[in-house]
Image: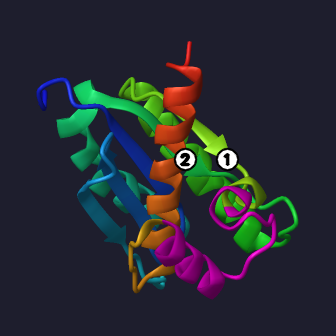
Amino acid sequence: MNLDNTKLYVGIDASFSGTGVVVMNNEFKIIEQRLIGTKKRDSIYDIEERMLYIVKVLEFLLKYKADIKLALIEGISYGSTGDGAAQLAALNYFIRIFLLQNEIPYSDVSPSKLKQFVSGKGQSKKNMMLKEVYKKWGEDFDDDNICDAYSLARLAQFNYNKLGPIK
């Protein structure tokens, strides 16, 4: 789908409870946003099935593929430990593989760099990020995953316009 050579930017905040995805154009208009939620199930393959579902829903990005200049994924929190951290890391890389296989240019950004971009501080609680996004850009979100995805899309647009395409 070619939107008259519109430049599109994608933000992805990966989470099993709610993966936030925002597609934004160069004029900061949200073209599409989705919250992909999964619920824990009583299955030996629970995590794998949830990962497959999230990536299956992400296939909606393919209709914008020709116009996506950069997708940013919130990186792994290296301070986290335990099974949850390993599972989130797996989801993060599974999404990266999907983007790579579909030739969608992507990069990741650490949670602290995203917070620095939005709030000016590397440490901000989720509710403060919602407030800072509203103060900085006038966008009001009810969900912190969508808010982070929007912020990632803004950062993708900023980085692309500053640095150009990923080579």
Total tally of numbered discs in the picture: 2
Residues at marks 1 and 2 touching, judged by CB atoms closer than 8 Å: yes
Disc 2 crowd rating (10 Å Cα; few below 14, some 14-19, many 20+) is many
Q: Label 1 is placed on what type of residue?
A: Val
Q: Main secondary structure of the magenta part?
A: helix
Q: Residue furthest top?
A: 167
Q: Which mark is residue 155?
A: 2
The quadrant in which residue 54 appears is bottom left
Q: Residue 26 placed where, x, y %?
A: 33, 39
Residue in view at x 57 percent, y 27 percent: 162
Q: Residue 8 placed where, x, y %?
A: 31, 38
The secondary element bearing badge 2 is classed as helix
Q: Label 2 is placed on what type of residue?
A: Leu
Q: Residue 155 placed where, x, y %?
A: 55, 47
Up-down relation of residue 82 to residue 66 (above or below): below
Q: Which mark is residue 109?
A: 1
Up-down relation of residue 103 to residue 114 (above or below): above
Of the pair 110 and 99, the residue shown nearer to us: 110
Q: In screen coordinates, is 136 left or right of 146?
A: right
Residue in view at x 28 percent, y 57 percent: 57
- Bounds of the magenta span? 115-136
Q: In screen coordinates, is 1 left or right of 94?
A: left
Q: Is residue 159 magenta?
A: no
Residue in view at x 48 percent, y 83 percent: 40
Disc 1 crowd rating (10 Å Cα; few below 14, some 14-19, many 20+) is some
Q: Residue 67 placed where, x, y %?
A: 26, 29
Q: Marks 1 and 2: which is nearer the front?
A: 2
N-terminal-most mark, 1 or 2: 1
